[in-house]
Structures are given as C-alpha cells and as structure tokens.
Image (spheres, rainbow, N blue to C red):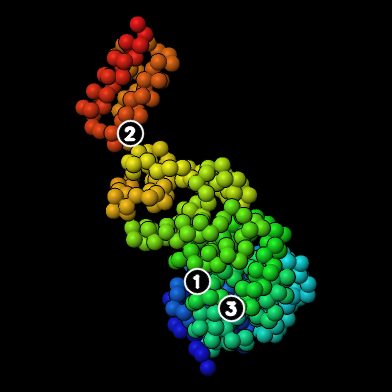
C-alpha cells in the first residue's frame, strides 16, 4: 500500500473542514489528479482537486453548510468550486463519458471511483488518495509509470486522442515534466498519426498548452521530438528543427545567466527572426496584446548596448534580444537590466526654443537627434548632454542659413 506523503498543502486553513463536510470519513471524497501525483514526486502543489460521490447539488450544499462560498463552475459536468481562505478547491462528482467529439464530452455521474479514473488521460493523472488514511488508489499502474518516468495513455492511445484532441499536446507537456528518455512508443506513434486533429481545436487551447510546455525546466528536447514527428506542422508550420535548436541554446543561456524561464521569450526563439511572422503567429494563437508586442519587438537584431535596448523596448524585451544574440554571455551586460528604470531625456522642446530654435518641426527633429546620441552614448551625465544639445542646436541653426 502506498501512502500519500505529508505536505504543506494538506494543512491549509479550511481544507479539513471541507473534506469532512464532503464525507471524508464515509469514503465519499478523495484528493485526485495533480495534487496526488506531484506530492508523490515531492513537487510543489499549485491546485487542489477533489472527487466525490455526491451529486453536484449535494456538494454545493455541503460546501455552503461548512461555511464556504460555493461557485457552480460547471454543474453540468459535476464541478463546484469551494472558496477556502487560501484559495479555490475544485470539487467534482465522479463521472464517466457517454460521448465525445474531440473537444467536448457528454458525461453521466457515477459512484465508482475506477470509472472516474478511467476517463482521465494518463496513468499518472488517474491517481487518487483517501484524505483520512492517505491511501493512494492506483487502478492503471500510474505509480510505476511515475517512478519510471513514462507518460502513458490509459487504454488505447488512438481512442483517447479521438475523445480529446488536446491530449496530443498534453502528452508532450507531461513528458517534458515527468518523462525520462523517449516517450512511450505507442503514445508517440498515436500522436504522430493524429497530429492533424489539432486543427479542430481552438487556437486558445493550443496556445495554453504550448505556453505551459515552454514554461518547463527544459522543453527543447521535447519540442525537437514534436518537430521531428510533425506534431506542430498542422497549426504552427513555421516552427522547424532550427527553431528547436535555437530554443535549446536559449534555455542553456537562460540557466547560465540565472534568468527565470519565460515561455514567450522561448516561443520567440522557436520562430524565425521576422516581426511579421511573429505577429501572424501571435494573432493565430490569439495571444494577448502584451505578448504579441513582446514577440514582435524581440524578433529584430540586438543592439550592442543593453540599456539602449531597454530604453526602446523595456527590460524584458532587451533580455530576450540579448539572450538570443550571438554575443558571449559574459559580454551581454544583463546585470544592467536588473531594477531598470527608464531615464528621462534631460532636454525638452522648450529648452531648445529658449536656446534659439524657432518653434516647429526643427525642434522635434533636433530633439530626436539629441535623443539618438544620448542613447548611443549610454545615457551620459548632464554635462555631456548639454554639449550634445549645443552641437545639435548649432547644426540646426546653420542648416537654416
């Protein structure tokens, strides 16, 4: 018998009251999914999910009876979200699939734990644990797969992909996190065979999985497998083997520089250095305006002055450009971007007019010339700025004669 290790999340305020209300001592509720899997692996737990034999309405009433807010997140699919002092806990009635179309499932409720586990995608995600005894229930060999570093579909891989096409991308995301060596051969073959199914998914779901994958510790080998297998070709054909190689180099440089991983930076490394391509892919994936702008700006060549890049684009984009450049890591000057505060040009249009220029386009043009030199000289002190200003004003006045 495997017992769920103790972990900080199991002592969160209100959790004991919640599971008591949901019938923990009557075997009516279990912890399920990622919380169980990650605790066994000694990883931090982000989300706590429970499964229960109670119908959704009963779960809702019991959550409220325990003094917590109950949000009917997806009553048709059995999910009620309990709001505890530390955050949300999803409570879902045991269920089995009646029909699926690759994107959505029609379910009926059940009281059989194994039926509910059987509808999950991978063996390592089908683990559940009794909240009182800590006993881990494993119907499909998930514990052994977790130990071996194998991400394996429950049942026939082709059928599981037909039920939900997103499972193709999820396989690679979980392989990046938990896998060792090559993926399960049957799972990999099924994903390659059904890669075109991804075209039926919303671009938001594809983007969400891709961003999660790229946020992993080292996604480059997994992305390379995906490129070699043609997984991304139906939805992002612009990503090729060269992009996977650039990603690997970027990840190595991030780690060597002590930089936190950023999935948008890593997505940019996968793409050709072309802002129009970056824009097209960002729009295709329906990324946010901020993410789109970051991809666009980071698609160009890197300036030689880190703070000049930060002034133009912000510290994040500057870091993206520098890490993707061909310059030696020791020469990048990434430390200059820490706690970056954008300086203000110490000269205004009014100052130029006071020193002899006539109001109009010449003031704007001269101010831009001063700013360019100020940036190129890495934001010199006031004395130097004054000298630059005098030279540019003199040149503007001579040009009028």
According to the picture, the residue beneath numbered tag 3 turns out to be 184
Residue 226: % across, % down: 58, 65
Up-down: is 354 above or below 253? above
Between 230 and 95, the one nearer to me in the picture: 230
Q: Is mark 2 on a helix, strand or loop?
A: helix
According to the picture, the residue beneath numbered tag 2 turns out to be 375
> Is residue 387 visible in this depiction of the protein?
yes
Q: Earlier in the sequence, mark 3 or mark 2?
A: 3
Compared across the picture, whether 372 is left or right of 129 comes to left
According to the picture, the residue beneath numbered tag 1 turns out to be 177
Identified at 27% across, 19% down, the residue is 391
> Is residue 264 visible in this depiction of the protein?
no
* Quarter of the figure with residue 120: bottom right
Identified at 43% across, 14% down, the residue is 360
The single residue placed furthest to the top in the displayed view is: 401
Question: Considering the image in quadrants, where does the C terminus appear?
Answer: top left
Q: How crowded is mark 1: few (under 14 residues within 10 Å), some or many (20 or more)?
A: some
């Amino acid at each position: 018998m495997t017992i769920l290790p103790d972990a900080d999340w199991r002592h969160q305020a209100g959790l004991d009251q919640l599971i008591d209300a949901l019938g923990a001592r009557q075997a009516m509720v279990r912890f399920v999914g990622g919380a169980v899997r990650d605790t066994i692996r000694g990883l931090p737990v982000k989300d706590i999910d429970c499964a229960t034999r109670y119908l959704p309405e009963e779960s809702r009433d019991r959550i409220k009876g325990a003094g917590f807010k109950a949000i009917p997140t997806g009553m048709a699919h059995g999910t009620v979200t309990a709001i505890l002092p530390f955050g949300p806990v999803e409570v879902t009635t045991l269920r089995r699939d009646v029909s699926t179309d690759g994107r959505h499932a029609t379910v009926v409720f059940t009281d059989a734990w194994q039926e509910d586990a059987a509808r999950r995608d991978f063996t390592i995600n089908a683990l559940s644990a009794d909240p009182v005894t800590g006993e881990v229930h494993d119907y499909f060999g998930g514990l052994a797969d977790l130990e071996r570093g194998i991400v394996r579909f429950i049942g026939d891989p082709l059928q599981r992909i037909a039920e939900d096409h997103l499972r193709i991308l999820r396989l690679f995301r979980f392989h990046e996190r938990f896998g060792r060596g090559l993926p399960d051969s049957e799972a990999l073959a099924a994903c390659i065979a059904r890669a075109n199914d991804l075209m039926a998914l919303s671009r938001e779901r594809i983007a969400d999985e891709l961003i999660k994958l790229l946020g992993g510790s080292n996604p480059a080998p997994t992305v390379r497998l995906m490129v070699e297998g043609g997984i991304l070709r139906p939805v992002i054909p612009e990503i090729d083997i060269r992009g996977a190689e650039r990603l690997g180099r970027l990840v190595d440089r991030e780690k060597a520089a002590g930089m936190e991983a950023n999935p948008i930076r890593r997505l940019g490394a996968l793409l050709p250095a072309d802002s129009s391509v970056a824009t097209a892919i960002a729009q295709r994936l329906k990324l946010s305006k901020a993410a789109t702008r970051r991809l666009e700006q980071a698609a160009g060549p890197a300036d030689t002055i880190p703070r000049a890049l930060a002034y133009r684009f912000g510290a994040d984009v500057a870091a993206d450009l520098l890490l993707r450049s061909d310059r030696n890591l020791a020469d990048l000057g990434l430390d200059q971007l820490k706690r970056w505060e954008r300086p203000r040009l110490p000269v205004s249009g009014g100052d130029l007019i006071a020193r002899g220029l006539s109001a109009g386009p010449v003031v704007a043009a001269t101010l831009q010339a001063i700013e360019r030199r100020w940036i190129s000289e890495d934001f010199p002190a006031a004395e130097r700025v004054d000298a630059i200003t005098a030279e540019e004003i003199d040149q503007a006045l001579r040009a009028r004669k």
